[in-house]
Amino acid sequence: MDIRLSDEQVEMARQARKFFEKECPPAWVRAMMDEDRGFTEEFWDKLLHMGWLGMHLPESEGGLGLGLMDLMVVLEEMGRALMPGPFFSTVLLAAEAVREGGTALQKKGTLSAIAAGRLRGTLALYEPEGGADPGYIHLTAEADGNGYLLKGIKLFVPDAHVSHFLICAARTQDSQIPFQGLTLFFVPQDSPDMAISLLPTMDATRKLCAVEFHGVRLGPENILGQIHQGGIALKKALQAAQVGLCADSIGLAQRAMEMAVEYAKIRIQFDQPIGAFQAVKHRCARMFEEVESARSMLYWAAWALDQSEPEEAARAVAAAKTTCSEMADRVVSSAIQVLGGTGFSWEHDIHLYLKRAKANEAALGDPVYHREQIVQMLEKSSAGGASAPGGSEV
């Protein structure tokens, strides 16, 4: 497994950083935090012209046909800039769900429109009763003639208020297995009997919504793929999105570390920079170690998904989400310790990075959830007499 970046990917990252330094400076991010929409159409068009909306979409649907690893390079830079807006919800939630579960006709109509910047979408997953585990999905889709009625509430739906459609996960069959008995529905945002409201959040760089379905009627054409079979596509889409959050976390942690190092060089105490003190030097070194270690986990997970290795991908994604989430929290917290009281002022951007890190940690399964997934996979491997990657006995 070669996880070194190619020359093309290095250039991709360089171009992305140059773009965000110009188009997404901290002052603009703060302005978008105060806006309900959280982005502008002008900025969305610029993302389109960079080709990023269709990076991971097939060429047959108007995309570039690049791998997930290529997209991760850009997502790191988005995290570094704390980029606001519905890119993540559209490209790594909605588009991936359609790509993995849609019919040929649904893919052609939806993915090509996303790649062209005409459609934005999101995924409605969480419910009031539980978290990221699909076993908590209880929103019902009742048969009504040749269609279905959606009844229930979805919470923490990213950017639902600015999306043209939602992919809603509903339970259409009882099952003790979380990903079984689920159906994904394509729901237009202007559907009657559906209410969308913004939720207050800690991280204002991303907007989350509550979506209420009061008997939203959908026809059979609104079923994404096949009835009762949405769990497979949902699982794959969530894995891609979880890896995307890892990339975002690494990008923001990298920037937080750089802020701390820059400050340690110029902050003078006892007639010398604080970076000369061993405690500060070692804290900065530790931040570097944690960022680089987590980046290796990200590359492993992205590689496994690109290579279509289901079992290894499942392990790698769960391990990466846990590692990158906790790493970002620790690194940004350490950066604030280096900055001291300066880091707690509204004028300094570092606390925005801490809020985004905390939000990423909770999104799409926190470390406790993903560690439990790892335990279950290890138990399954042990029962089957399998060995873990690298040859060690599980």
Image (cartoon, helix red, strand yellow):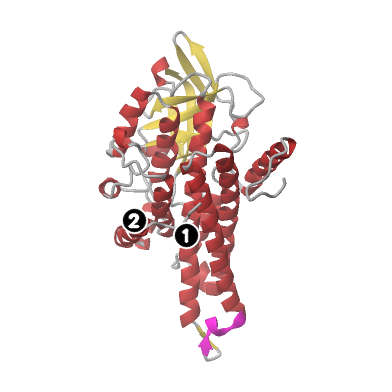
> Where is 126 relative to 38, above or below?
above
> Where is 285 relative to 138, above or below?
below
Quarter-of-image position of residue 7: bottom left
Question: Dot 1: few (<14), some (14–19), or many (≥20) neighbours within 10 Å?
Answer: many
Q: Amino acid at mark 1?
A: Leu
Residue 89 in picture, x, y percent from top left: 42, 41
Quarter-of-image position of residue 132: top right
Residue found at x 58% / y 77%? 280
Of residues 190 and 275, the one drawn nearer to the viewer in this rendering: 275
Check disc 2 and report the residue beneath it.
8
Highlighted magenta segment, given as a residue range: 272-278
Q: Is residue 199 visible?
A: no
Figure disc tally: 2
Residue 367 in picture, x, y percent from top left: 63, 48
Question: Dot 2: few (<14), some (14–19), or many (≥20) neighbours within 10 Å?
Answer: few
Q: Is residue 88 visible?
A: yes
Residue 369 in picture, x, y percent from top left: 64, 43
